[in-house]
Amino acid sequence: MNTADNPADLSPETIRSWLQSHPEFFDANPDLLPAAITASGKVLSLEAGQLNTLRQKNEQLSLKLDAMLDRIRHNERIYSAFHQIQVRLVTAPHPMALLRAATHDPEQLFGIHRATITLSDRQPGLIALFGATSRNPETADRVFSIDHKRLVETLRDSPRPVIRVGQEGTNRELFFGPFSARIRSEALVPLFTHPESGPEGLIGSLNLGGETPNRFLPSDATDLLRDLADILGLCLTRLANPE
């Protein structure tokens, strides 16, 4: 290819055609090859370079797929644990069994430091129903009562769980009793007589406390907690009104 006489002939098509006719050019000039098709100082073919790139992309996709599968398995374990607790709530034959399912099970299945129930003082029947638990070491300090107005203020008159971290929980003793000093973050999940009853049906809260500030965070998804609280609220209402 003589370009000195007519430089205008150096079009991409001309260069491509010439290189196709002279593949040995890159054997003599390996420094002009992209790094992607050079390995250990040896010149590889363009096909080998493309294959190497595809292999790298495949490895990245495999890592992403493995991460997705890990998340799916983790979510399946969470759903299974929540389902297990819900079944125990619905089938609890007496208040003590219901209390264990609502508090001990979340602690064991999710590594929560302390789980309790706080009831509105407008629920004397429920409060009396769980009064005997204070004499049982297994369930002592699991159920607390609170002034209804203060309960509404703490739960912010909303069906969504209240997530509090660090010093936000200024009244933790109302929800965790003697364990409040060790709580660093918590989820207070409203309990209603019926999922659609609204603020007028508020009867208390399911309280989940963690020892670390990041155990419960405002950014956490809370749909499953709300589902669990809905079932617990229905079960508590059934106990208070067995007829």
Image (cartoon, rainbow, N blue to C red):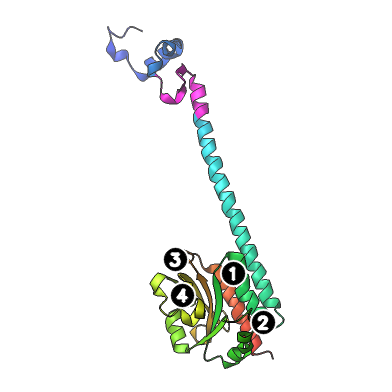
Say what amino acid the circle numbered 2 marks: Met
Asked if residue 45 is among those painted magenta in the image, a careful observer would answer yes
Q: Secondary structure at mark 4?
A: helix
Query: Label 1: which residue?
Result: 107
- What's the mark number on residue 124? none
Say what amino acid the circle numbered 1 marks: Glu
Name the N-terminal-most of marks 4 and 2. 2
Please state, as top left, top right, bottom left or bottom right, where the C terminus lies in the image.
bottom right
Horizontal side, residue 84 vs residue 59: left or right: right
Q: How dense is the environment of label 4, judged by Cα within 10 Å: few (below 14), some, or many (20 and up)?
A: few
Report x, y in % for residue 179.
51, 76
Q: Secondary structure at mark 3?
A: loop
Q: Which residues are magenta?
A: 33-52
Horizontal side, residue 171 vs residue 91: left or right: left
Name the N-terminal-most of marks 1 and 3. 1
Query: Label 2: which residue?
Result: 96
Marks 1, 4: nearer the viewer: 4
Query: Label 3: which residue?
Result: 213
Say what amino acid the circle numbered 3 marks: Pro
Cα separation, mark 3 vs mark 2, equals 30 Å
Report x, y in % for residue 242.
68, 89
Name the N-terminal-most of marks 1 and 4. 1
Name the N-terminal-most of marks 3 and 2. 2
Cα separation, mark 1 vs mark 4, equals 17 Å
Say what amino acid the circle numbered 4 marks: Ala
